[in-house]
Amino acid sequence: MINIGRLFELGIEIQHANLGVNSFKMTQDESEVVANLQSHKVTDNHLLVIMIPSMDSKKSDSVDNIQFRNLMQFLVLEKRDPKLPKNNQEDMFIYKRTQETLNNILEYFFQHFDDDDSNCEMFRKLDVSSFEIDPVKGVSDCFGWSWSFNF
């Protein structure tokens, strides 16, 4: 089971690592994400949201050998400037910028993956075959990317 305090520290570390993240939130579900985004300003871009992971024990074969699998989601979002006209070109620019930030986070994550004293040590059992990266559109006028994975 993941240590939530360490996960929160990882979010702060990412925010301060000059990767393109200007604000960070950790939340438990999508309704909280929407509530947080309503107060998010364009000047706060890019926002990293780490969802508190859900867990299951599907890989466990007995009560004596319970192994929890963490189901994680990171969101990298940019709030659209309401003064700009809504058009596809601006949306694509936002996707491009947020994709660059997500790529920076992934690169940072993998560079520090084997550090014993790093927050990333909690991901040692990472299932890379579970990676899913999906576009996020129009959540409280924000666009960006969702990175989901299991460990």
Image (cartoon, rainbow, N blue to C red):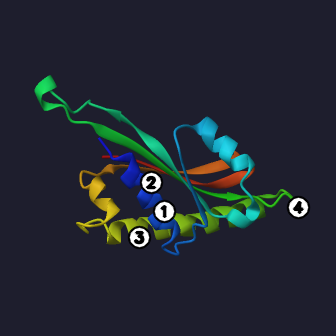
Percent x, y for residue 66?
18, 31
Give the CA separation, mark 3 to mark 2. Answer: 19 Å
Dot 3 amino acid type: Glu
Question: Which of the labelled discs sits on residue 95, or is there none?
Answer: none
Real-space Cα separation, disc 3 to disc 1, in angstroms? 16 Å
Q: Is residue 61 above or below residue 22?
A: above
Q: Which residue is mark 2?
A: 8
- What residue would you read off at disc 3? 107
State the residue lying farthest toward the front. Answer: 5
Work out which residue is located at the far top of the displayed protein and give it: 63
Q: Residues within 10 Å of mark 1 (few under 14, many from 20)?
A: some
Sequence-wise, the earlier of marks 3 and 2 is 2
Q: Amino acid at mark 4?
A: Lys
Could you say where residue 18 lies in the image, as x and y percent from the top left?
A: 52, 75
Three-letter amino acid code of the residue under disc 2: Phe
What x and y, as percent, mark residue 3?
A: 33, 47
Residue 12: image tag: 1
As measured in the structure, the alpha-carbon distance from the residue carrying label 2 to the one carrying label 1 is: 7 Å
Q: Calculate the distance from the C-alpha at mark 3 to the C-alpha at mark 4.
A: 33 Å
Q: Give the residue displayed 15% in from the left and 24% down from the top.
A: 63
Determine contact: label 4, label 2, CB under 8 Å.
Answer: no
Residue 113, horizontal then vertical, whole percent: 29, 65
